[in-house]
Image (spheres, rainbow, N blue to C red):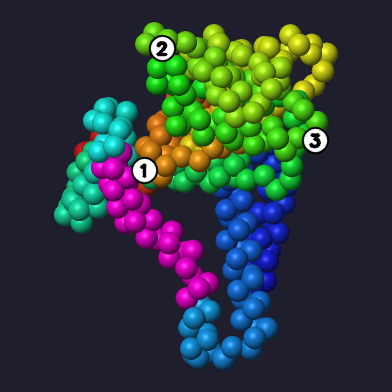
Amino acid sequence: MEFIIVVLIIVGVLISLIPERRSIWFGALSFGWFLAFYTIVFITVTRYLEIEAGSLGDFIAMGFLFLPFLAILLLPIWGTLFLLVSGIRLIQREGFRFTNLLALGLGIALVVYLFFNPFLQVTESNIWLVGFMRVLVAIGIFFAIELVMYFLTTFSNSVHMRRYKFDHIIVLGAGLIGEKVTPLLASRINRGIAIWKKQEKPCYLIMSGGQGADEVISEAEAMKRYAIEQGVPEEWIIMEDQSVNTEQNLQNSYGIIKERYPESNHRAAIVTNYFHIFRAVVLARKMGYKCVGYGARTKLYYSLNAFIRDFIGYVVLTWKKQLLVLVLFLLVINFFTIIEYVNNFVIQAAL
């Protein structure tokens, strides 16, 4: 009990030392703090109720206590099933395209690994094969851990315990159907309008999205029309219609803000879908902009595939740090394999 309390305090202090929520470590530490807090609460409740050891109440309490840990242990199984089901539904509803195969492909890869792993008998005499297999498994473990951290940090950046005051709300574009916004884009605009209505004083809505080669009008124009139809006065809407990706969305939108208020330090909200929040706020952070991310609801079968796509985008965005940490991780995981290889090499050289 005392050990858990110490862990809880340490993790809580570490979280408090991270002023920036737009860090992948924020979600991981928050999750660790939650598990420690969860454990303390149930141990305290069990003692307070004086539940006897071995009783039905003790069995139920302990079962409920270990429920989160059981969910984590079973993550590879239910995660694989979830990936397969959502991946198949996405292809059925959105069509067979490469970008729609990420969730299904990852699910199939996990099935192959879980099925064939017990049958893989790697002989210890083949040091190269041992090292190769350990490297592959280690890389998979590395990105699996980071994917969980990415999800937790995205969730942390989606939950706001207090109401913020904004001067600008930036809504990111997401494609059109003719001259109309897609349901995905409409959900973003609706979320932005909801935040706009909750502000104590009126602020500006920046509709950010250029015109693609196959689009009749710019996304910003279509977004503006939709917002006006929803009751937003035109004078409170600003269009940014030159961007073609998320990075340009943010650069151009913040450029507009700086032109309008060159000497002011304005705080902005970035509105996108939940799966896209973290990568958007990380981009804003790299550009030196203060912001808070808000997510619009998306259908679950679509969100999972899109989340994986955005995670890949985040890895590419931070590839230098990724490579450094991955190399260190591989060195630690394969330390004994390296020692064994060097030892065998020395013995063979001596002979």
Left or right of residue 4, residue 76 in this image = left
Q: In the rendered image, is residue 285 in sight?
A: no
Among the two numbered marks 3 and 2 on one chain, the one whose residue lies closer to the N terminus: 3
Label 2: which secondary element = loop
Which residue is more in the foreground, 147 or 230?
Answer: 230
Magenta stretch in the rendered image: 63-90
Res 330 → quadrant: top left
Query: Where in the figure is residue 35, as x and y percent of width and height?
Result: 57, 61
Few, some or many C-alpha atoms within 10 Å of disc 2 (few <14, some 14-19, many ≥20)? some
Which label's residue is closer to the chain start, 3 or 1? 3
Q: Which numbered disc, 2 or 1, marks the residue that appears first in the sequence?
A: 2
Circle 3/circle 2 CB separation < 8 Å: no
Going 60% across and 58% down the picture, which residue do you hit? 34
Q: Position of residue 55 (x, y in %)?
A: 50, 91
Disc nearest the viewer among 3 and 1: 3
When the figure is inspected, residue 88 is found, relative to residue 94, above or below; the finding is below
Q: What residue sits 68% from the left and 83% below the top?
A: 48
Q: Which residue is mark 1?
A: 301
What is the x, y in percent for residue 65?
A: 53, 72
